[in-house]
Image (cartoon, helix red, strand yellow):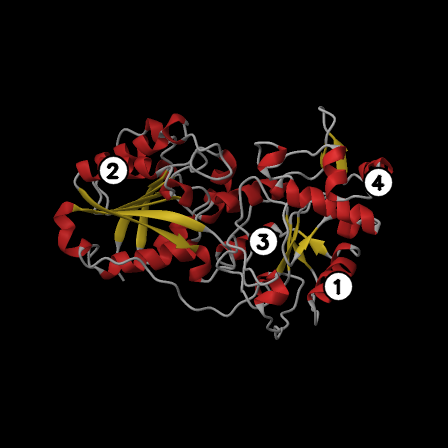
Amino acid sequence: MSKFRYVDLFSGIGGFRIALDALGGQSHGYSEIDRYALQTYKINFNDPDHHDLGDVTKISKLGQLDVLVGGVPCQSWSVAGKRRGFEDPRGKLWFDTINMVRLSNPKVFVFENVKGLADPRNIENLELIKESFEELGYIVFHKILNTYDFGCPQNRSRVFIVGFRKDMKKFAQDFKYPTSEAYNFQLADFLDDIERKNIIKKKFSSTVLFDGKVPLSRNIFQKDDEFNDFFVLCDTRNGHTTIHSWDIRKTTKREKAICEAIMRNRRKSKYGDQDGNPLSFKDIQKLVGDATKKDIDSLVDKKILRHTENGKIDLVHSKNSSGIDGIYRVYLPNSSIFSTLTATGTRDYIATEYVEGETLEEYRLNFISSILTKKKLRQVTPKEAARIQGFPKDFKIHPNHTHAHKQFGNSVSPPVVKALMKKIIATGVLR
């Protein structure tokens, strides 16, 4: 096993360190300013005091290293953030990261960031970062890797930027990013109170699931010939496992028709130039001929519709990710994937029982009656979040659940780093 010296920037709770230590790495310091993350880090890793390097913006000396790593704060590029890039102070931390490479002159560096950095709107910033490293004398690569491909049931795509010092060119030529591995797991394998149950999924034609037209927005984890393993509570979109508020609250046939008409038409340009526009009562009457103001009042009382300031009518739950009554997505235990864990938390839940159905309508009704109505759902615990992120079983979790969830949401997934570092070590650059 290769022995190599490394420093971990923006160390968080040690997601990089877990992987590097397992491969022969020897820590020579870490930099982190979040005091709660530091508490978790220090509980798990027995370092001398001088290894705590403090604020990265104030480090003036690092010494010669073999490897420099870090998960550079990513909010300024993320979908959840405001995409301010280098205008955001957190985006400017890239300049401090570049300076750390200059100070330590490592053989190799690995930096992680959200995939938004590689989006077309941010690609110039990514190229600026890479060019800055190249000017320091490095051969630089980047690729998006998904946690799911390395044994974790989570849809978590991140950019990994790898640089080899130019005098290590012969090793850089042999470098290849790790590729996806095959896994046969389900979410229940990572949960505390749900036993795995092997579900034989029935196959359907696209005509049954999508009225013959498969939506372009489906992700790589959704099959075109079987039911989704999750349900979405959303009033602004439709889908074969979408549940609307008018599905779970007592409504008449006409009230449902009114809600469906608003949902299907509110994005049309004839009603306004926003992504979703309120409709007037006259607009609704043209779409649903027998609609009455009494129907609208009833739906307002049920908190499904609302009156806007300009006298029009819109959905109460008018944003996709806002969900309904605080719930957005509910994943079944047999799902192979969970949504991306975030520092700020999500409205995503896990059903504590399995749901099956011979027909789509039966599948949906079974979910409503057995999961939603009976409240057989919950959010993941910090301990489960650790497993979903790929942390080892003996990892000590912060006792405050809010801090713990934030820490795992911010962390890099150790199995991804380990797979990547194995590829770097395989080139021989760290011998």
Looking at the rendered image, the disc whose residue lies closer to the viewer, 4 or 1, is 4
Residue 101 — which label? 2
Q: Earlier in the sequence, mark 4 or mark 2?
A: 2
Q: Label 2: few (<14), some or many (≥20) within 10 Å? A: many
> Label 2, label 3: how many angstroms apart (C-alpha)?
35 Å
**Tag 4: residue type?**
Asp
Q: Nearer the viewer, mark 4 or mark 2?
A: 4
In the image, what residue occupies the spot 65% across and 47% down?
328
Q: Quadrant of residue 191?
A: bottom right
- CB under 8 Å between discs 4 and 3: no
Amino acid identity at mark 2: Val
* Above or below 61: residue 147: below
User: Mark 4 to mark 1: distance in Å?
Assistant: 28 Å
Mark 1 and mark 3 residues within 8 Å of each other at the beta carbon: no
- SS for dot 3: helix
Decide which of tag 1 and tag 2 comes sooner along the chain: 2
Q: Are marks 2 and 3 in contact (CB under 8 Å)?
A: no
Q: Quadrant of residue 68?
A: top left
The percent position of residue 376, horizontal first and vertical second, equals 74, 57
Q: CA distance from mark 1 to mark 3?
A: 29 Å
Q: Using the image, determine if residue 247 lies above or below residue 192.
A: above
Between disc 4 and disc 3, whose residue precedes? 4
The residue wearing badge 1 is 366
Q: Which mark is residue 295?
A: 4
Residue sitting nearer the eye, 91 or 418: 91
Mark 4 and mark 3: span between their CA atoms?
A: 47 Å
